[in-house]
Amino acid sequence: QVHLLESGGGWVQAEGTLKLSCTASGFTYSSITLGWFRQVPGKAREGIAVTDNDADTLYADSMKCRFTITRANADNSLSLQMNNQKPDETGIYYCATHRKLLLSLSVPDFDIWGQGTQVTVSS
């Protein structure tokens, strides 16, 4: 059974740093595209960054200078290092995956999701 589990969420002050992790199980990890998404209150879920099985990456423009996505096929893990966070980035952060040969930040392209982890950025 395919399963994604996020961890590392919590509280951080504005301009602070936080690192999220995602552990994948139930499929061949190295052959999939993985991504991080978030949903802040009152807004649609949006893509943050994705990485494919060649470790190519794609970032949302507003986050590519502050966030870093990293995957480690050896232990089926994915991480998101978040720097200089802003209060309006408070929300639920999700790990997601699909098996298409596509590097995309589009939510509908992803069909397997973790349960999410809460990130709260205080001012």
Image (cartoon, rainbow, N blue to C red):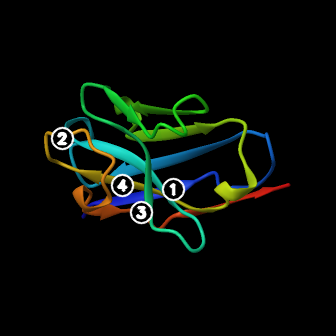
Q: Secondary structure at mark 1?
A: strand
Looking at the picture, which amino acid does disc 4 mark? Ala
Residue labelled with disc 3: 114
Whole-percent x and y of residue 32?
A: 23, 42
Give above or below for 56 relative to 19.
above
Q: Between disc 1 and disc 4, whose residue precedes?
A: 1
Looking at the picture, which amino acid does disc 1 mark? Glu
Whole-percent x and y of residue 118?
A: 63, 64
Q: Between disc 2 and disc 1, whose residue precedes?
A: 1
Q: Between disc 3 and disc 2, whose residue precedes?
A: 2
Camera-nearest residue between 3 and 107: 107
Q: At x 60% / y 72%, what residue is drawn?
A: 41
Give above or below for 14 relative to 83.
below
Q: CA distance from mark 3 to mark 1?
A: 6 Å
Question: CB of mark 3 within 8 Å of CB of mark 4?
Answer: yes
Residue labelled with disc 2: 102
Q: Where residue 6 is drawn, which disc sits there?
A: 1
